[in-house]
Amino acid sequence: MFSYLKHLAKHSLNYSIAQILTKALGFLLIPLYTRFLLPSDYGIVSTLAAITGILGVFYEMGQLGSWQRFYYDYRHDQKELKEYLGTIIIFIFVSVLAYTIILNLLGDGFFKIFTKEVPFKPYIQIALWTVFFGLFIGFWQRLFQIRQKSMIFGMISIGQFLASTLLMIFFVVYLREGALGMVKAAFFAALLFFIIAIFGLRKEIIFKVNILKL
């Protein structure tokens, strides 16, 4: 019982440290935001956060939950496990890439139904690709969570936050791009960690789609 509690406390501490650090650093950045961002910039960023949050749920299609649930069914057979993980990653990549391209081409009229204040180009277009890249970071991180590697999980979270923050300072403070700078910072941070995630996942999957597993 004691070893179990010790194990639980260690991982809870690692997750908590990552959460506290990112939230604390975000709080310290508030004076920076209030100096270089206009109220209209906040409105644009908040609207985009809502759009990307909703799209992320639809794009994922519950596969992140199944990724964790069925991992344990296949964990004793590495070939089966890699085939399952590969099936999910390829399916998500192809389907979400198609959705993102379609929305980039035809989304101007669609998004005007919901928001007329935020221009589709370039704000929403960039945000769409940010969601696409961000999905795969979530799958990569979830693997570390499943395998109880909370330290690596936390380091990824902190690293992504720091990358986004440094890019935000560059675009917003140095280039004075306002809301567009915030959007660009999130995009490039997601792109960077997407590349790292794909590199990290390459040995975890087999490039094959099994319809039954899907």
Image (cartoon, helix red, strand yellow):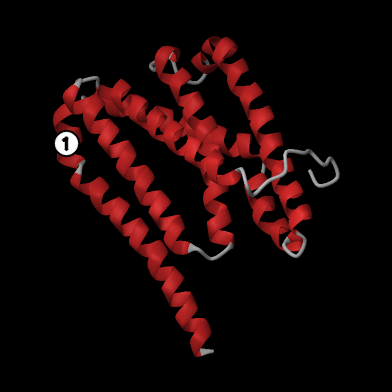
**Callout 1: SS:** helix
| Relative to 202, residue 10 above or below | below
Q: In this view, does 164 lie to the left or right of 28?
A: right
Screen quadrant of the N terminus: bottom right
Instruction: State the count of labels.
Output: 1
* Most distant residue in the right direction: 212
Residue found 77% across the figure and 61% down from its top: 77
In terms of image quadrants, where is residue 189? top left
Residue found 36% across the figure and 57% down from its top: 19
Q: Who is closer to the viewer here, 41 or 11?
A: 11
Screen quadrant of the C terminus: top right
Residue at numbered disc 1: 32
Q: Where is residue 16 in the image (x, y as percent from the top left)?
A: 37, 64
Residue found 40% across the figure and 50% down from its top: 157
Residue found 36% across the figure and 58% down from its top: 18
> Which amino acid, mark 1?
Leu
Q: Position of residue 173 (x, y in %)?
A: 18, 27
| Relative to 174, residue 201 above or below | below
Q: Who is closer to the viewer here, 181 or 58?
A: 181
Q: Position of residue 67 (x, y in %)?
A: 67, 51
Q: In this view, does 80 lie to the left or right of 60?
A: right
Mark 1 packing: few (<14 Cα in 10 Å), some, or many (20+)? few
Q: Where is residue 17 in the image (x, y as percent from the top left)?
A: 34, 62
Is there any visible trace of residue 37 in the rendered image?
no
* Most distant residue in the front direction: 203
